Image: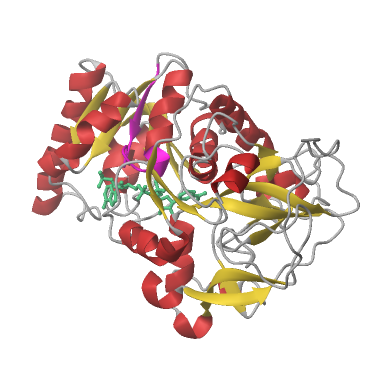
Amino acid sequence: MALDTNTGIAPYDAPEKELYEIGEMPPLGYVPPKMYAWAIRRERHGEPEVSFQKEVVDTWKIDSHEVLVLVMAAGVNYNGVWAGLGKPISPFDVHKQDYHIAGSDAAGIVWAVGDKVKNWKVGDEVVIHCNQDDGDDEECNGGDPMFSPSQRIWGYETGDGSFSQFTRVQAQQLMPRPKHLTWEESACYTLTLATAYRMLFGHHPHELKPGQNVLVWGASGGLGSYAIQLANTAGANAIGVISDESKRQFVMDQGAKGVINRKDFNCWGQLPTVNSPEYNEWLKEARKFGKAIWDITGKGVSVDMVFEHPGEATFPVSTLVVKKGGIVVICAGTSGFNCTFDVRYMWMHQKRLQGSHFANLKQAASANRLMCERRLDPCMSEVFTWDQIPQAHTRMLRNEHKPGNMAVLVQAPKTGLRTFEDALAAK
Ligand code: NDP
């Protein structure tokens, strides 16, 4: 069959319709006026099974620098959980749309391009990174776009995310899809991988270096599993933390030098008042945790970096165990936002505390190249169907998900497919 010279895709018969069922393919490049989406509305804020509801909505119109992508598969992240709950903020306080379509990770096919888009064409297979900005300020032109006043996260601070048949993104959000991965594997990794990349390598002069040691909280999770693998690509040693022995082998398989079970220690939560009996107990236990690190790194060798995201529960320990002149880099407060620490250790040992948030395009693209070069495993844990999108988020909310990153099928009719042609044939 002759291939289209622009897209390289064989023509196929499909009628032009107002709305397509999930998994049904419109003609390549034909944009139906309506689409299915899992929508959150302000009056439904709550647990995922309440806040996420299936709706038929208008398909997005795109601007000159934007791209419409047919979503083949999407990734599941905390962003969807937070957006559904409306905590710590409601997405409706950020954007003015009536409904919010969550989803900050996707793999799909370019379906329409704005007239100023040069680097992408209809038919291109892509993954999407979630950082948007207006591109017109000094941080976007010579600085770091993550510091731009217009910086926002697609699918969280914008309402046009990936839990719908089509998603609308800025052209600069697209990156080539690793062709050796399935649609769902390609969809599951970009948000957490790029975040981990910036945390480890984005904060000069504390970029993780060969031979250094990094303590990785939640080592079996989305961020953690990539932090371990990325540390290996840099020739550093990762010490992973878990809460259940069933996760130990998974973390070792990602290349950790050693694994510590946090359930063996009792020093979690806010710092007790300094020098109180509770503080002295806490310090004893935290030092025991530090000793468990030394059992892996060598006596007296503290970690150069702590990869933080649990927040309130772990922060006092993170700031204690990091070495003199080391860095605690933090991107979240999953267990709570009221982080406390003993500032004496911070100043006397000249430690650095660094906030980190997603990644700029250069960092996301560098991380994506490692995936395309097969130097990283996507660590996809589970795949859910379109109908199971709320349940997947409930698993995440309850910390009941399996190690790695979850994906959901959108237009891909089944798992294991690697191309657009595969998807057409499977139908
Ligand atoms: P996952 O659920 O996949 O992993 C988080 C891990 O944290 C869990 O597996 C768990 O591992 C561990 N954890 C949970 N509670 C605690 C606790 N009280 N103390 C210590 N460890 C705990 O989530 P992600 O890795 O995808 O995301 C983690 C956080 O990072 C979320 O809050 C998310 O919103 C945020 N995030 C922020 C980004 C940003 O750009 N700012 C980007 C990506 C994520 P175990 O129980 O085995 O210890």
Question: Where does the magenta region start and end?
Answer: 212-224
Residue 177 placement, left or right of 119: left
Confirm whether the magenta stretch covers residue 220. Answer: yes
Q: Residue at x 38, y 55 (%)?
A: 333
Residue 348's image quarter?
top left
Identified at 46% across, 26% down, the residue is 230
User: Residue 146 in the image: x percent, y percent?
Assistant: 65, 47
Q: Residue at x 26, y 54 (%)?
A: 400
The quarter of the rendered structure image containing the N terminus is top right
Can residue 350 be seen at all in this image of the molecule? no
Q: Residue 4 placed where, x, y %?
A: 83, 39
Which image quarter: residue 3? top right
**Residue at figure coordinates x 18%, y 41% from the top left:** 262
Q: Does 311 sit left or right of 377 as displayed?
A: left
Residue 243 appears in the picture as rendered: yes
Residue 6 painted magenta: no
In this view, the residue farthest toward the right is 115
Report which quarter residue 222 is drawn in: top left
Q: Going by the image, does 273 lie left or right of 427? A: left
Q: Is residue 392 above or below residue 59?
A: above
